[in-house]
Amino acid sequence: MAKQFFLFLLAIALIPGGFFFNKQAIASLPPGNRVKDPYAILRNSLPIEQKDLREVQNQLEETSDALRGSRWPTISKATSRSKFVINNKKNQILQSLPESKKNKGEAILSSLKNHLDDLAEEASEKDKSSFIESRKQSLQEIGELESLIVKDEFPYEIPAKYDNLPRLLGRASVEINTTKGNMTAIIDGYNAPLTAGSFIDLVQKGFYDKLPINRAEEFFVLQTGDPEGDAIGYLDPETNKDRLVPLEIRIPGQKETIYENSFEELGLYTENPVLPFATLGTLGWAHSDKNLNDGSSQFFFFLYEAELNPAGRNLIDGRYSAFGYVVEGEEILSKLEIKDRINSIKVLNGSERFKKQA
């Protein structure tokens, strides 16, 4: 009851505001999104239009609800439909791939077909644990196929006014080593190229190494990235001023990324961003409560709390830039406190997609 009472008070007390060192948390806690799996969010946010793979992906992801209710006829139907699409749309899927990636794609499709066969058998036997494992492998392979489809050319235009800022033109993965253990995160430069690029740039500079968790709000956020001394962000050595990164958010189906404006300012009250704050370990770029575009180096881990996150809208989506998700080691987040620190952050892969500037 004490926890529920605290959550209730926190939920009604918070109003839209900023994330920065020595400023209290005043942004409302988000009620969440139906899709909470970071891998599912990352699959859905890839800039592709391959309807057959998307159909299989959605069929398999939506078996989660049926599994909770043990609705095996529904699960069997979804599995059969997935097998049908992969068997009959193989050529169309391969045609979506660049020529240089078709051999790899064919191998993944062959493995996916085998896993779908396993799924069908496990569904008929009502073997829940085996079904979940095979589904995980199938969705992972679908994600790999979808990644192969993405064109080499960056799909979105970045305004020329930001040519001086670093950018990540694709995705990268990083290992975050903390005093409580390691986490792996995927950084999404497709949908937040400037935010992701600034983060990767600082990672490569070793900027975050040894920095403390400078804010820890239970059930809400963990924040770091505040350097030692008077500065509250990264100082550009050429200008000796904070390097500022604009608010950067994409909406599904829109050609242009939104810069320097929140959903609230644009009247987009019913929109959801491509990268939502909808799961434990969403990475968000911090800014002050006075300026949406003065984020520099501080970032936060969103602590998804189920009791405060029923399906619906929230006041963080559309007001902060999400730029990645913790995909392994998310249990570490519940152990980190204000006395802990980031030991180091290292780029595991994707550094070739990083550009210092346009």
Image: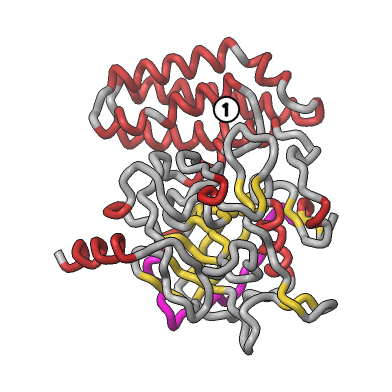
Q: Quadrant of the C terminus?
A: bottom right
- Tell which of 278 and 332 is nearer to you: 278
Q: Quadrant of the N terminus?
A: bottom left
Q: Residue furthest bottom?
A: 229
Q: Residue furthest left?
A: 1
Is residue 342 found inside the magenta-colored segment of the image? yes
- Tell which of 240 and 207 is nearer to you: 240
Is residue 305 found inside the magenta-colored segment of the image? no
Any part of residue 158 in sight: yes
Any part of residue 332 in sight: no
| Residue at disc 1, secondary structure | helix
* Residue 57 on image: x %, y %: 50, 28
Identify the residue at image location x=56%, y=13%.
87
Identify the residue at image location x=83%, y=51%.
160
Picture quadrant of residue 154 = top right
* Residue 157 on image: x %, y %: 77, 43
Q: Residues within 10 Å of mark 1 (few under 14, many from 20)?
A: some
* Residue 251 on image: x %, y %: 58, 40
160 on left or right of 195: right
Picture quadrant of residue 148 = top right
Q: Residue furthest top?
A: 88
User: Is 215 situated above or below 152?
Assistant: below
User: Is 303 situated above or below 146?
Assistant: below
- Tell which of 237 and 266 is nearer to you: 266
Identify the residue at image location x=38%, y=48%.
32
Picture quadrant of residue 239 = bottom right
User: Is 352 situated above or below 113?
Assistant: below
Please give the count of numbered marks on the rendered protein.
1
The magenta stretch spans which residues?
333-351
- Residue underneath mark 1: 111
